[in-house]
Image (spheres, grey):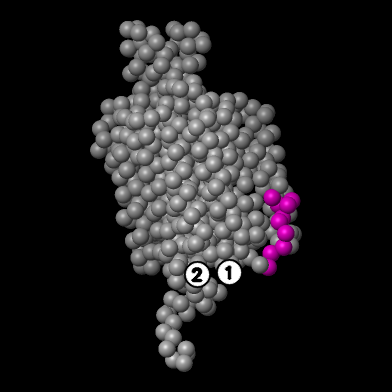
Amino acid sequence: MDSVTRAPLTAGERQALAEGIDLPVYRRRWTTLLVLCLALSATMLANTSLGVALPYLSRDLGASMAAQQWFSNAYALVFAGLLFTTSALADRYGRKMMLQSGMVLFGAVSLYVWLFVDSSGELIVARGLLGLGAAMIMPVTLSILTSVFPSTERTRAVSLWAAVSGGGTALGPVIAGLLLEVSSWHAVFAINIPVVVVGVLAGIRYVPSHQGTRDETLGGIDLPGAVLSTAGITLVVYALIEAQRVGWTAPRTLLMVLAGLVLVALFVLWERRAADPMLDVSLFRNSGFSASAVALTLVFFAMVGVFFSLSQTLILVYGYSPLGSSVSMLPMSVVMVFIAPQVPKLVERFGPRAVIASGMVLAAGGMAVLSTLTADSGYWHLLGGLALTALGMSVAMAPATDQLMANVPRERAGMGSATNDVTREVGASLGVAVLGSVLGGGYAANLASSVADLPAQVQDVAKSSLAGGLQVAASLGEAGRGLVRPVLDAWMGGLHVAHLVGSGLILVAALIAWIWLPRGTKRDAD
């Protein structure tokens, strides 16, 4: 009787069963995606909301440009160093467990910062712990998504995931700006707490904990791979972050980079012979996988490295309030939210190679527009560059991510997701380090002649950061009024070079995508 009355399976349900997805998991996949996007938004809010608070951290904590970079890089360093390890643990012992544990850690650290932290050192340590929580959260959101959606719906799901990622990135500064209008910078960390609470409670019910969220066939953790990958990535990123302070060609920098690269090479050699590798290095022989990984690294290098300084520019150069600064960047979120869901149609019509390369060219054009900003530029000039950049990123990021994930076996989705996130975080941390150094070095060089008559210690303060230069100008009273304009022009000159470098790197990523990505999707070939 049941066989007669039971409703026939839909085409989507048949596809899900064919790909090994349980029907109950498949039927609540969109609710699962909503929970995953909520968890993802916690990491996005934490990462981008801090930018609006940098001028206040510089003032209240006496944070130099280097310390401000560490507020960002402590998060990125731990995140990048542990992504493969946390993803491998999630694949073996349960992605839901890793997701929920990471959310709890994220919320606890955010609460501690909100209530107790009052020094740069404490904040850097806390940001590192938030990076650990993010390393537990972010890769499993994408790997669970891949496990609950069949291939026919995955591009659409990844597009929505990318839209939330972009929207959360832009929403963080808006909420932070509102909080800074009525409270101290500590309140910026309060953003994470309600998101975490709702995410954990919803995850208990709607994130599957059985089939599709762990690999029952894997053995124990690849301990040598975990140690080598964590040590190698961390050492390289740390060396490049510190290079601005000790020098790019200093023996310490060169030795640390060399040591890190040796450890990464040993990691690759070990993974080639390991029975249960954390990273299947043979995947890089696939042009879709490797080109996507390289392109994503270069794009995030350029984007995060340049936008690291944007909030400071809006507040300290253009005189925006924290809220005004945040709202001025909100159109990026609007563009991403509306454009990203349309990207699968473009991919279906033109293929991933053309869509990804075209999107990156648009983003590079937007970055070039931003490179023409001056201290006197109006909002429409800024909006044009931001909107074009956001349009390009919306078009390129989801299909690039989908190309990478489509070439990873479903049971190793955590490994593929970790590779995706490592490309983003290593690129982001290198971007902050390298382009931050380009900006800081250009600013200091441009300002040198204007502060040459001041005492050496005062010169150092003025050249250490934009906030420092304006602080010195204010401390000189009437005599300092003439220094304000040179400080602003020096900063915008450094920003001009950083934007051009960023634009060039995104064009290189577009070229890589065009040359090495396949015309069609892997699923088309199948």
Is 219 within the magenta?
Answer: yes
| Residue 165, position as x, y percentages in the image | 43, 51
Q: Give the residue displayed 45% in from the left and 66% down from the top.
A: 29
Secondary structure found at label 2: helix
Magenta range:
217-226
Of residue 350 and residue 50, the one placed in the foreground of this image is 50
Residue under circle 1? Answer: 211
Tag of residue 25: 2
**Can residue 265 be seen at all in this image of the molecule?**
no
Counting residues from the start of the chain, the first of labels 2 and 1 encountered is 2
CA distance for labels 2 and 1: 9 Å
| Residue 213, position as x, y percentages in the image | 57, 64
Q: Give the residue displayed 72% in from the left and 49% down from the top.
A: 266
Of residue 9 and residue 401, the one placed in the foreground of this image is 9
Is 311 within the magenta?
Answer: no
Count residues near mark 2 (Cα–Cα under 10 Å), then give few for <14, some for 14-19, many for 20+: many
| Residue 375, position as x, y percentages in the image | 31, 26
In this picture, is 21 found above or below 184? below
Secondary structure found at label 1: loop
Of residue 272 and residue 157, the one placed in the foreground of this image is 157
